Amino acid sequence: MHQKIANATFQVVSGNSFGSGFSFINENYVITNYHVVSNMVNLEEKKALGLIKLRCEDNQLFSASIIHINIDCDFAVLKIESNLPEGREILQPAENFIPIRGLKLIFTGYPHGENHLLSHEGIISSPLPDGRFHIDGMVSGGNSGGPIVDLTSGKVIGIVSERRFIGSQDIKNLRAATNVIIQQCENLRQAGTIISSGFNVADLNQAYATGLTILTAVLESNANPGIAIGYPITPVVNAIKEIKI
């Protein structure tokens, strides 16, 4: 079962954003999280800004276009631009699934944006509103968009979408503050060099901002309490029913 699910999973590369995705329902569709590919979407003009790269475990590369997004449910439907090679799997949805505490599951993905596909087993530790559920399993940054599969049936029940950890909002605030500092550094550079006590203020601030950026990325990437949130697959199924290829 683990290898079957792995053979349906891709690493999703959207510019400088990395996540996971999987073939779903037929060979045309690949599912991932919206937040993984959001940097390739112009919401005002309602259009994609480019193609998404998909990488298999054996390093085969494919291109896919964004054909549907749902921000509230955090998913995107991609259309792959070529036929899948022999040996690739296409996962199918569980019908009328209701999260039950203790259900055993498998999830796959590419944690930390590295080109290493990992599979894990876990359980549903708690149902949540709107069909979401807590996962008791090791989910890291880069797992986003990967499939969550019922261990017994092999059917998709959800998408890996969030990690739950203390301090997540603090990290977001730190990232926002860092972005402000970076912008101020750029403003200083445009205004000209400022020297104070022998120091170039713009360069000093830039070094500080760079350090904060690295710190934020490390904290966010390695925040892993073993608790994640899965989003239900039903909205994805409903969206695909409305898509005309």
Image (cartoon, rainbow, N blue to C red):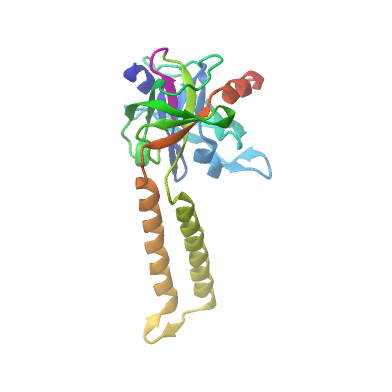
| Whether residue 188 is situated above or below residue 47 in the rendered picture | below
| Whether residue 223 is situated above or below residue 148 in the rendered picture | below
Q: Residue at x 54, y 24 (%)?
A: 233
Q: Is 183 colored magenta in this rendering?
A: no
| Whether residue 126 is situated above or below residue 41 in the rendered picture | above
**Residue placed farthest to the bottom in the image?**
197
Q: Residue at x 55, y 39 (%)?
A: 50
Q: Residue at x 52, y 39 (%)?
A: 37
In-image side of 137 versus 127 (left or right) = left
Q: Can you tell which quarter of the image residue 44 is in?
A: top right
Q: Can you tell which quarter of the image residue 163 is in?
A: top left
Image quadrant where one finds the C terminus: top right
| Whether residue 159 is situated above or below residue 223 in the rendered picture | above
Image quadrant where one finds the N terminus: top left
Q: Nearer the viewer, residue 110 or 195?
A: 110
The picture places residue 91, in percent across and down from the top left corner, at: 46, 17
Q: Nearer the viewer, residue 136 or 89?
A: 136
Q: Residue at x 48, y 65 (%)?
A: 182
**Residue placed farthest to the right in the image?**
45
Q: Is 147 colored magenta in this rendering?
A: yes
The picture places residue 89, in percent across and down from the top left corner, at: 41, 16
Say how many tags the image has: 0
Query: Magenta residues?
Result: 145-153
Q: Nearer the viewer, residue 119 or 32?
A: 119
The picture places residue 62, in percent across and down from the top left corner, at: 44, 29
The picture places residue 129, in percent across and down from the top left corner, at: 57, 31
